[in-house]
Amino acid sequence: MKLTNNLYFYPEKGTLDCNTYVIRGNPSIIIDPGSAQFVPALIHDLHQDGIEPEDIDVITNTHLHGDHCWANEAFKELSGAKILCHQLHQKSYDITVIKTTKFFGLKAVEFNQDGYLDNNKLSTGDMEFELIHSPGHSPDSICFYCKQEGILICGDVIFNKNTGRVDLPGGSADELKQSIDKLSHLEIEYLLPGHMDIITSAEKVKSNFEFIKKHILNWL
Ligand SMILES: [Zn+2]
Ligand SMILES: [Zn+2]
């Protein structure tokens, strides 16, 4: 589903999957391809928008919880795209990947990384994203913020009327509160989380931050 000129949204397809975002440009990027079992459904959705897997150049993630990156390798095989991680993903790999999958009794995610994202920004030609470290849900949570278009791809940091959980390995309620406070000062038209609904107006995004600060963060 097309959200803006260059940005596409594909809702999660079941449990252990996540919302996927595609940014068309040079390079074209897929953020959080989700779970491997839903890759055929994701490809179907991409086709609806006239996107072939081969059109994608880079696969990356908001964080390395399995529901966001189990499909990295399968999507790479189909598309030939490169998997680029953030340095922080590598730094907390033992906590976010190994310990968290153990926590759920699952097999650790494996994929062959091809390189790293720039630490602070990601450019796709027409769009420039600032990469904002936003720990709390996981130590490696990165938000992708495009100021010109007011887009925040925020992974599991913040949802529609909720936040990401803080009880997984490396989680911290205090860090999440700080991260959300920092993000709440950005100008956002499109709040694009890793699960559930997206929020698409500055007014609704603002009231969502207010709701979360008032009703959720105090109880974490
Ligand atoms: Zn997560
Ligand atoms: Zn998730």
Image (cartoon, helix red, strand yellow):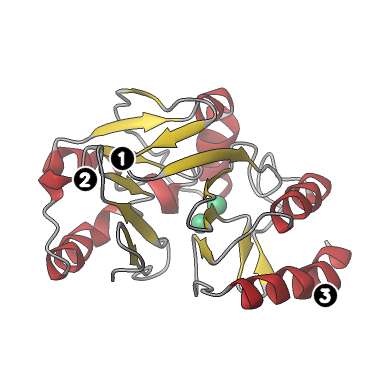
Disc assigned to residue 75: 2
Near mark 3 (Cα within 10 A), the count class, few <14, some 14-19 or many ≥20, is few
Label 3 SS: helix
Disc nearer the start of the sequence (2/3): 2
Q: Nearer the viewer, residue 108 or 127?
A: 127
Disc number at residue 215? Answer: 3
User: What is the three-letter code of the residue carrying label 3?
Assistant: His
Amino acid type of the residue tagged 1 in the rendering: Ile
Left or right placement of residue 63 versus residue 176 in this view: left
Q: Secondary structure at mark 1?
A: strand
Residue under the image location 50 percent in, 52 percent down: 148
Residue 151, percent from left and from top:
50, 57
For marks 3 and 1, give the CA distance.
35 Å
- Relative depth, front residue between 1 and 156: 1
Q: Nearer the viewer, residue 40 or 79?
A: 79
Name the quarter where the C terminus is drawn. Answer: bottom right
Q: Residue furthest right?
A: 218
- Residue receiving disc 1: 59
Label ID, residue 72: none
Q: Around disc 2, counting alpha carbons within 10 Å, would you say few (fewer than 14), some (14 to 19), or many (20 or more)? A: many
Marks 1 and 2, the one that precedes in the sequence: 1
Corner quadrant of residue 96: top right
- Labelled pair 1, 2 in contact (Cβ < 8 Å): yes
Q: Disc 2 versus disc 3: distance between alpha carbons?
A: 38 Å
